[in-house]
Image: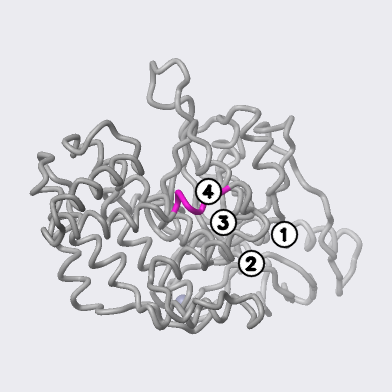
């Protein structure tokens, strides 16, 4: 980026103009990136081989963020003092640490806090640095999803929350904080929110802590936290959104389109809502629709292509040509879980899809009486409920498992 100011006053005017997260030329978002920057103020040239600038993710327009302008101002003043006309400014590795999470000592970049629009103008928290983004490998969430003490909720492609249940049962949560995924797929928490967590949870996250890549603005997490432009959908809708996110991740990464019967799926998706009363009839409507969207809504041929993309020829099962959707999804999950497989019970994870299938066949009255009873018993045993008349318990457990499954699929396919 090259930028010229004919007088120091011109620079000051720019310095005092606060840059927002939305581009002033187009609909794009301004993300923070490292750039090679040359600034000319009057007759002095300042060169920064690495300086953070705001760059529109649509039109590429660049501008200077708050903290970088402060650095330029300081550098310019030092040049005047030393009577220099050309200056080279290499960024220092200095990292300021805020008063949050001092013990656990996460890596983060204090410059993000001062540069990303809005973060340091936080009136809710009196101690500086609360809204500093701290970045993690998204696989960190796997642990929290698999341990029942925690509740993880990914309610959009880029926004979720995690809570630790209160062991005393007095409150719903011991702590409960939001998180986001940035456009590089990294997991982001606010430093101040990490401070609310118990030390054990903080320590687990520590192992996944990565350097800042400065990206965060283009996420529902940021937009919701800063601009309140998001409301949390019901869990049934989250499952559908996560299915779409999974399909879009696979399309981007492998160029394979897993979607099947798109129009029919959106018709059935309309029938997916939380029942008011839980009878076999009301539950069957939702279960049927879920079966259509989440099982038949995948193209089995394309799932097989994805299986082939993930498994080399000598790794493939001899029978894979005959497998149907659910089995293929299971094997795809197994591959995605490589290296972390011991933490995840894939058999249990995939179980809600089999249940959808069993349930639908049962409701469609396609079975003999004997077979009906054994299907009911199988559903009851798999979901761990007392008996088949407990439709509400069956429904809630099934939905909970579907939600987990599709959260994993989104998380692991990015
Ligand atoms: Zn733009």
**Residue 23, image x, y percentages:** 45, 71
Disc 2 packing (10 Å; few <14; some 14–19; many ≥20): many
> Mark 3 — residue?
116
Q: Is residue 173 above or below residue 35?
A: above
Spatial separation of the CA atoms under disc 2 and disc 4: 59 Å
Which of the marked residues, 1 or 2, is nearer the chain's N terminus? 2
Depth check, front residue: 12 or 344: 344
Q: Residue at x 65, y 42 (%)?
A: 205
Task: Evaluate whether residue 223 shows in this view.
Answer: yes
Give the residue at mark 2.
11
* Comes first in the chain, label 1 or label 3: 1
Q: Which numbered mark, 4 or 3, is in the foreground of this view?
A: 4
Residue 235 horizontal side relative to residue 360, left or right: right
Q: Quadrant of the N terminus?
A: bottom right
Task: Kindly indicate the quadrant of the structure image that contains residue 335.
Answer: bottom right
At which x and y percent is residue 55?
56, 72
Check disc 4 and report the residue beneath it: 345
Q: Which residue is mark 1?
A: 73
Asked if marks 1 and 2 touch (Cβ < 8 Å), the reply is: yes
Provide the residue span drawn in magenta.
344-349
């Amino acid at each position: 980026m090259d930028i010229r100011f004919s007088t120091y006053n011109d620079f000051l005017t720019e310095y005092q103009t606060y840059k927002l997260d939305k581009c002033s030329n187009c609909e794009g978002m301004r993300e923070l990136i490292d750039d090679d920057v040359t600034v000319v103020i009057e007759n002095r040239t300042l060169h920064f081989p690495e300086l953070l600038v705001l760059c529109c993710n649509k039109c590429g327009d660049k501008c200077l963020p708050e903290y970088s302008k402060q650095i330029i101002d300081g550098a310019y003043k030092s040049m005047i003092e030393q009577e220099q006309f050309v200056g080279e400014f290499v960024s220092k590795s200095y990292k300021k640490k805020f008063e949050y999470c001092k013990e656990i000592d996460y890596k983060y970049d204090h410059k993000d806090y001062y540069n990303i629009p809005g973060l340091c103008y936080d009136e809710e928290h009196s101690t500086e640095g609360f809204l500093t983004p701290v970045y993690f490998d998204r696989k960190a969430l796997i642990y929290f999803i698999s341990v029942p003490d925690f509740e993880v909720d990914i309610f959009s492609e880029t926004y979720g929350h995690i809570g630790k249940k209160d062991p005393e049962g007095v409150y719903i949560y011991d702590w409960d904080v939001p998180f986001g995924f940035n456009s590089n797929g990294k997991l982001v928490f606010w430093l101040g929110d990490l401070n609310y967590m118990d030390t054990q949870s903080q320590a687990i996250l520590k192992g996944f802590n990565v350097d800042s890549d400065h990206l965060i603005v283009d996420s529902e997490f940021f937009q919701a936290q800063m601009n309140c432009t998001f409301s949390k959908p019901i869990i049934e809708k989250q499952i559908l959104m996560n299915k779409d996110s999974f399909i879009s991740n696979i399309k981007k990464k492998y160029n394979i389109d897993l979607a099947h019967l798109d129009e029919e799926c959106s018709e059935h998706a309309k029938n997916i809502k939380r029942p008011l009363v839980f009878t076999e009839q009301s539950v069957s409507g939702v279960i049927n629709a879920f079966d259509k969207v989440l099982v038949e809504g995948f193209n089995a041929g394309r799932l097989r292509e994805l299986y082939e993309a993930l498994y080399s020829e000598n790794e493939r099962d001899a029978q894979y040509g005959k497998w149907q959707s659910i089995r293929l999804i299971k094997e795809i999950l197994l591959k995605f879980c490589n290296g972390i497989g011991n933490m995840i019970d894939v058999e249990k994870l995939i179980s809600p899809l089999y249940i959808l299938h069993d349930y639908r066949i049962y409701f469609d009255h396609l079975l003999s009486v004997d077979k009906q009873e054994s299907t009911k018993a199988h559903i009851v045993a798999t979901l761990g409920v007392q008996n088949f008349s407990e439709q509400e318990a069956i429904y809630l457990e099934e939905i909970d498992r579907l939600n987990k499954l599709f959260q994993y699929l989104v998380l692991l396919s990015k």
